[in-house]
Image: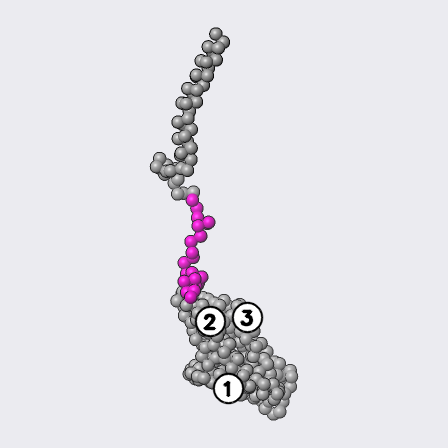
Amino acid sequence: MCGGIAAALNLGGQRSLPVTLSYHSGRILSYTLLGGLLGLIAGSIDLVAWTIALRYLAGILLIGMGLSVANWWQGMQWLERAGSALWRPVQRYSSRLLPIRNPAQGLALGLCWGLMPCGLIYSALAWSATSQDALTAASLMFFFGLGTLPAMLAVSLGADRLQGFLRRRGLKLFIAIMLIVSGVWTLYLVAAHGDHLRHRAPGAEPMMDHSQMDHSGMGHGAMDHSKMKHQNAGAEAAQESAAPADSTTTGTDTGHSSGQHN
């Protein structure tokens, strides 16, 4: 479906570079805006369970997309069918923009792109939303859009050799494996560090920082120190027992000295 819309830019035989660039600029802008919106929404929900569930969802979608790219499982089609309800009104509007005649039309059509039913876009949006920050999510989707440029430019400009390279089975398998590994790693991180995520998630109770505690009102003056054992207790006892002996010795020495003088 993604390739079909990109190929529509070539209707009428037009492959103008300004039109093509404006179209892809609108497409990447739509990704960026949607990522920022979802990041803002995800960050505004102060639920720890939501944070963890969102990361699990992103991992599952990445694995599902990898399996779909490799043609091992096409279960992602149900997600695209669900998104088609949102795409229909946008499709009616975007059809008026074809064929593309100027950069303004290309930009408008590109802005419609982010709402099209595409499992890869949905997976990327879910992954970016796990940041729970509008700026971070928007940045992630912006770079996602840049990563799709080679394939989409090949379709738009009719680069047959590049299209042939991108359709190679080996390249598809490599991309699929990377997606699956990323999804598995995401699920592992959530499962292994769930407690840490609960502390860092929005709305979670902060961990106690003892360095910031105020000890002034703890009432140390009311403490009973009579039963406290100090490390120097033995040394003090030894000094006390030695004191009388020193006095006796001093007295003896004084008396002996007096006898000698007499």
Residue occupying image coordinates x 55% and y 70%: 139
Q: Which mark is residue 260?
A: none
On the image, the x and y values in percent for residue 64 come to: 45, 79
Q: Secondary structure at mark 1?
A: loop
Which one is earlier in the sequence, the residue at label 2 or at label 3?
A: 3
State how far apart marks 2 and 1 are (Cα).
Answer: 29 Å
- Reading the image, the residue beneath label 1 is 1
Range drawn in magenta: 192-215
Q: Residue furthest right?
A: 17
15 relative position to 178: left or right: right
206 relative position to 36: left or right: left
Inspect the image, locate mark 3, and give the three-letter code of the amino acid beneath it: Ser
- Reading the image, the residue beneath label 2 is 185
Looking at the rendered image, the disc whose residue lies closer to the viewer, 2 or 3, is: 2
Quarter of the image where one finds residue 170: bottom right
Inspect the image, locate mark 2, and give the three-letter code of the amino acid beneath it: Trp
Q: Secondary structure at mark 3?
A: helix
State how far apart marks 2 and 3 are (Cα).
Answer: 21 Å
Q: Residues within 10 Å of mark 3 (few under 14, many from 20)?
A: some
Q: Nearer the viewer, residue 133 or 74?
A: 74
Which one is earlier in the sequence, the residue at label 3 or at label 1?
A: 1
Is residue 142 part of the magenta span, yes or no? no
